[in-house]
Structures are given as C-alpha cells and as structure tokens.
Amino acid sequence: MGGEQEVREHVKRIVLSRLDSQTAKISLEILSECTRNGRMGEILREFDAQWREALLEVMKKHIQVSDDDLRRRIEMNLTLMDGLSPRLVAHPDLDREALAADVTEHIVACHC
C-alpha cells in the first residue's frame, strides 16, 4: 500500500469518527462548556494550538510550501472537520460514508 493511500485511509477513519452521533454530541457539549468555563476554554485553546503545530511539523516534511500556506491549509481543514458535528446534529440522516469520502478527498488533495 502506498503512502498516499495510507494517508487517505487514516483520514477517512478520522472523518468517520467525527460523524459518529455520540462523538458529535460530546464534542458539541465540550465546546458549549468551554464558552461558560474559562479554564476549560484555555485548555481547549492550548490543545488546539499544540495540535496545529504538530500538524504543521508533519506536513512540512511532505509538502514544499511556506509555513503560512500550510497554516492556512490546516486551519481550513480543521474548520471543515469541526463542522462535521453540527452537520450531523442538523442532518442526522446524511450519507456519512459519502460525506466522509468527499471530505477525505478534499483533505488529501490539500495536503499531498
């Protein structure tokens, strides 16, 4: 199995995990609590910053573009991923497999 195919399968597993009903509910509850609880908000922001930097370091090894360009790609795709939970709540009957395939292809195209 080639490197890009492995990335594609890994990304799809992550996307599908975000399209799990229980995971979506918990994610939204955590975000909601972060708006009320300052310490939880700080923890979330610290985790988010660490996650973005870790993604940047991994991507720099595989993509030859500026750090600013990579940061924009990361932010765009994290925004896309973060939007999956509200979509699932708003449209619980959506075709999760089809959406996961489309989101996966978008992310892989941006980063490979």
Image (cartoon, rainbow, N blue to C red):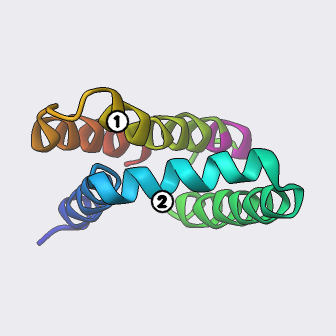
Query: What is the three-letter code of the residue carrying label 2?
Result: His
Q: Quadrant of residue 95?
A: top left
Task: Kindly identify the residue that appears in the image at 61 percent across and 39 percent down.
Answer: 75
- Quickly name the residue at label 1: 89
Q: Residues within 10 Å of mark 2 (few under 14, many from 20)?
A: few
* Residue that label 2 marks: 62
- What residue is rendered at 42% in x and 34% in y? 86
Q: Is residue 73 left or right of residue 43?
A: left
Residue at (63, 49) in percent of width and height = 31
Vertical placement of 58 versus 70: above or below?
A: below
Q: Secondary structure at mark 2?
A: loop
**Residue visible at 58% across and 61% down?**
55
Q: Residues within 10 Å of mark 1 (few under 14, many from 20)?
A: some
For the residue marked with disc 1, what is the amino acid? Val
Mark 2 or mark 1: whose residue is earlier in sequence: 2
Separation of residues labelled 2 and 1 (CA atoms): 35 Å
| Residues at marks 2 and 1 touching, judged by CB atoms closer than 8 Å | no
Which secondary structure is most common in the magenta stretch? helix
Q: Is residue 28 above or below residue 57?
A: above
